[in-house]
Every structure is written in structure tokens, then in C-alpha cells.
Image (tube, rainbow, N blue to C red):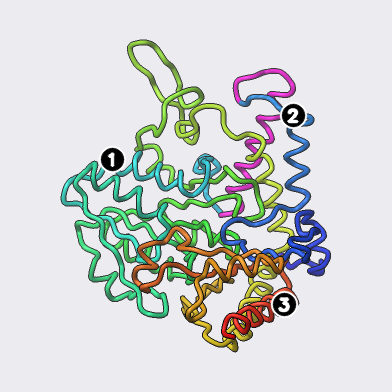
Amino acid sequence: MSITTTLSIDEIRAQFPVLDQQVNGKPLIYFDNAATSQKPKQVIDALSHYYNRDNSNIHRGIHTLAERATSAYEETRKAAQAFINAPEAEEIVFTKGTTEGINLVAQAYGRKFLKAGDEIIITSMEHHSNIVPWQILCQQTGAELKVIPINNRGEIIYEEYLKLLSDKTKIVSAVYISNALGTINPIKEIIADAHKAGAITLVDAAQAAPHEKVDVKDLNCDFLALSAHKMYGPTGVGILYGKRLLLEKMDAYQGGGEMISEVTFAKTTFNDIPYKFEAGTPNIGDVVAFKAAMDFMSQIGHQFLHDHEQRLLDEGTKLLSEIDGFEPIGTAESKASVISFNVENIHPFDLGMWLDAKGIAVRTGHHCTQPLMDIFQIEGTVRASFAVYNTVDEVAYFAQALKEIVSKFRK
């Protein structure tokens, strides 16, 4: 059962030091959360504590600092297991982020098990990190990449997905929530139908993890990747969840220290999972601080996160739709707290710079989804994305600022 916080939004905001500043003489309004979220003090403190008190390499040392560092690192693995409801902690592999997680599966699973004539299915709204690794794999193996089309609202056309599925389908890799559109895909159904066709599944949960309760048992996905920095945690850290049976069958992804059991000049035997996929000294301090981010989200509660962000999305959509020339990109019935848009005859980069002059941080461009932008026949969009520390007042100020910018441009 999701916990609902008793904190007010002002009390939540007070935990984020970066928000207490001015940009271009205006109070900072940070609406670039889909790119990376800000970090609460407890995450910053956890990172500082590690480097101040516990800094040491892990797993191989027997001295006190090494044992403390190892314990803190593995506690984050257990926290991640609980956060996504994974059956075992050993099914949690630490990565640099979602991108590395997808590449790991493509190379360690795909290169071993796919061959010419096999097919991989993705959606039209994928981030480049869920396109390029599969294109590379197809070049390596002779497999073919298939793409599920979308409608003009930015929703996958499910009947077309079912038509693509066949006994040639070996992998279905789909984004849970689109970073560019905010579309929430019917991911559980996508997984179930992929399994009926005999395919394994990977979920890109980079945008889902900050907004939705992610439960790998309920989804029954084979792999799932996410990034800490999208969910109030440090950059350069993520996890790949994989079912034990699959992880054990996969080849090692990188060679080096920690991922080995025994090395001789004649041959190497590999370590057990998950260490088989964690070569070299990891990003220990940021992994340790990631636990504080997951604790923060759990203390706030997924229901509160969802309800608050939905309120911001609804208010923003209403206010922005009143602006002359406003063109929303992505109007799916099921959406997360992302508003991607253009304004008629104004370049999104210009809008982004004018908004920054008013202290408002938004993202502009193709959002690492160039094929999606091509479908909509646009260069890019302005994207405002909301988090738990954003307020209705900020949304109203943003809408008014945008209205003033558009009005001046039209003169």
C-alpha cells in the first residue's frame, strides 16, 4: 500500500537546496525534470557522508571502511529490489543508467541468442537509447528491427503491434512512459502479448520510475532498466532488472575485476550474478546515495506523487491551451506530467531562451527522439515536465510568461 506524505509542498520544496536561487534575476522555476530531476538534501548528505566517512573500494577489502562501503552499496541493491518488487536482490544489476542497461541486454543476451531472420520490435516513440542498441545488434546478427506505429495523439496503434508479432519475434523492447510526449503505454499488455509470441521483453522505465509504481512481478517483464537521476537520485547510476534464469544464461558484458571467479592465462571463469555484469570499480558513492533517493520517494508515496503531478499536468494543459498558436504534441488519453508543445511560427529554441530569461527552465529540441519528431514533421518541441516540488503557482506563472512572450512576438 502506497504511503501518502503529510508534508506540504512547501516542506517538500525546502528539501531541495537548488530551488532556492534566482536565475536571470527571477526565482528559479525548474520544469526540466524529464531530463533530470533535482536532488533532495538527504541524497546530497548521503553522498557527502560516504566520501567524508566511508570512502573505500568494495567487496574485496576486509578493513572497516571497506566493509562499511560494501554494506552501504549492497543495501542500495536490496532497496532497489524492494522498490521495483523484484523477487531477488541478485536480479538487480547496477549500471550507469537506462542506456547502459539496454546496451547490456542487447549485447549480452541479443548477440548470443539472436540470428539472421529474427525480429526485434520497438515503438515509434522510443528514446535513441532504445533504438540504437537494437540497430547495432541487427547489424551484428542479421536480425530485423520492426517499429509499432502511433496515431496522431501519440498512442501506439495496438492492432498494428499484434500484426507485427510472429514466431520470428525474439525481443520486444518498449518505453513505459514517453519522455517526449508523456504517453503512458499499456506496458503490461505489451509484455503479455509478446510472451504469447515467445519473445522476451525489456521495459525502458526511465520516465516511469519517477511517476508510477513500478512492479516487475506484476508486469512480468523479463528485463527493466531505469536511471537514478530521473528519480531524485545521482547521475551516472541506474539499475537493470533481469530474471535470474536469463541473467545466468547471458554472456559477460565487460571483462575486468569483480566480474570474475577465477582468472588464469589459460581461461577465466565468471562470477555469479549480478557481479558478472559489474566489472571494475563501480560508482560507489552515487550508488549509496541512490538509496536515499528511493527512500525519499517511498516517504512521499507514489499516490501523492501521481496525484500532485496530475494536478500540475491538468492545470498546465488548461492554461497553455488558451495561448494563441499553442500546438500540443502528444495528447494521449493516458499521460504523465509532460507537456510537449510548439507555438505557431515561433522556433522552440527561441521560446526556450525567452523563458530562461524569465527564470523558467524547460527543455527544447528533439529530446533524443528524432524519429518521433519526423513522424510529427517537426524539428522539435518545447517540453515542460513537472516533479513533486513544482507548484500550481509556478505553472500559472509559466503560462502567463509564455503568453507575454507570444504576444510580444506577434506584434
Q: Dot 3: what SS?
A: helix
Q: What stretch is highlighted in magenta?
A: 59-84
Decide which of tag 1 and tag 3 comes sooner along the chain.
1
Residue 111 numbered tag: 1
* Residue that protrudes farthest toward the top in the picture: 265
- Across and down, in percent, residue 279 comes to 48, 29
Residue 361 seen anywhere in this rendered image of the structure = yes
Magenta residues: mostly which secondary structure? helix
Q: Could you tell me how far apart the alpha carbons at marks 2 and 1 are, in whole angstroms?
A: 39 Å
49 sits to left or right of 399: right
134 sits to left or right of 369: left
Q: Is residue 285 above or below residue 224?
A: above
Closer to the camera in the image, 254 or 219: 254
Q: Name the residue under label 3.
A: 397
Residue 160 numbered tag: none
- Across and down, in percent, residue 354 comes to 63, 69
Do callouts 2 and 1 mark residues in contact (Cβ within 8 Å)? no
Q: Name the residue under label 2.
A: 54
The three-letter amino acid code for the residue at tag 3 is Tyr
Decide which of tag 3 and tag 2 comes sooner along the chain.
2
